[in-house]
């Protein structure tokens, strides 16, 4: 399918239309739908102010969406939940190898290809992300191509129901990065910090295992 779409696009674009035609746009959408067929989307909450959505296919990241929410730096630590914050920025990042595939298979101006990719995303996946975030003010306003190829990806590890806070603290202490006073200080300033740090360690360990490190 990808090869067929590529051949048709090469024929269409070689005609050098003054403006891209609806037929070309439809072919680009078909190519993208084919490329993203079977993708898994993993929602990761890094902080109340930062959420990301990792698009993973065959164990490799092929797209990343990062949402940055407003943080008030004027006083004490901003303890607002995500739902209480306004969106600052939505960033779409495409790995270098994926964008190389796009520019190789879709022979058109890079600037227009980026535009079509953003339009396709809005039409295809933006609603799904808004639903996952339970809000309709989510949008993507920045586009970037990373300097590296897509990294390995896997479903985020969640906290087992039977793990206690004491066990999470013990696991954090074993890592040697924080002392007990630091853990308690952070938890007081940012409620939920213990669980988040514990999960970050579990996910980091799984990442290193998959990487063979």
Image (spheres, helix red, strand yellow):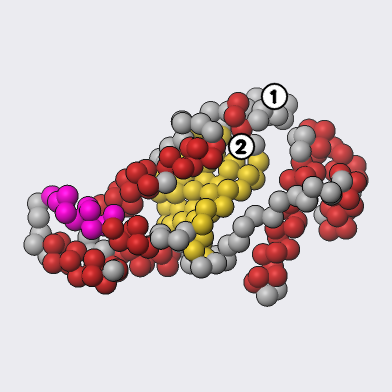
Q: Position of residue 134 (x, y in %)?
A: 54, 33
Instruction: Name the residue: 59% across, 41% down.
Output: 50
Q: Assign the N terminus to one quadrant of the image.
A: bottom left
Q: Is residue 149 above or below residue 192?
A: below
- Residue at coordinates 46% horizontally, 53% vertically from top-left? 93
Q: Where, by quadrant of the figure, is residue 177 drawn?
A: bottom right
Q: Is residue 175 above or below residue 92?
A: below
Say which quarter of the image contains residue 99. Answer: bottom left
Residue 18 locus on image (x, y percent): 9, 51
**Image location of residue 121, percent across then percent down:** 37, 48
Instruction: Choose the circle earlier in sequence order: 1 or 2.
Output: 2
**Of 143 and 157, the residue lying toward us:** 157
Circle 2: element type:
loop
3D distance between C-alphas at marks 1 and 2: 16 Å
Which range of residues does the magenta coloring cover?
19-29
Q: Along the line of sight, which residue is nearer the eye, 206 or 114?
A: 206
Q: Which residue is mark 1?
A: 75
Can residue 8 be spotted in the picture?
yes
* Residue under numbered circle 2: 49
Mark linked to residue 30: none
Disc 2: CA contacts within 10 A as few (<14), some (14-19) or many (>=20):
many
| Occupied quadrant, residue 190 | top right
């Amino acid at each position: 399918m990808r090869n067929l779409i590529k051949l048709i696009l090469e024929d269409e674009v070689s005609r050098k239309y003054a403006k891209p035609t609806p037929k070309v746009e439809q072919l680009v959408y078909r190519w993208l739908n084919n490329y993203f067929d079977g993708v898994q989307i993993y929602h990761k909450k890094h902080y109340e102010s930062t959420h990301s959505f990792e698009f993973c296919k065959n164990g490799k990241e092929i797209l990343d969406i990062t949402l940055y929410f407003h943080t008030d730096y004027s006083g004490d630590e901003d303890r607002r939940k995500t739902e209480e914050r306004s969106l600052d920025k939505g960033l779409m990042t495409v790995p270098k190898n994926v964008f190389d595939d796009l520019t190789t298979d879709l022979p058109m101006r890079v600037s227009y290809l980026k535009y079509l990719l953003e339009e396709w995303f809005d039409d295809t996946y933006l609603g799904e992300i808004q639903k996952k975030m339970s809000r309709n003010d989510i949008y993507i306003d920045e586009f970037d191509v990373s300097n590296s190829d897509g990294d390995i990806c896997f479903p985020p590890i969640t906290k087992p129901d039977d793990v206690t806070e004491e066990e999470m603290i013990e696991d954090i202490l074993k890592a040697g990065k924080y002392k007990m006073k630091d853990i308690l200080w952070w938890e007081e300033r940012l409620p939920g910090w213990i669980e988040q740090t514990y999960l970050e360690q579990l996910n980091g360990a799984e990442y290193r295992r998959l990487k063979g490190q």
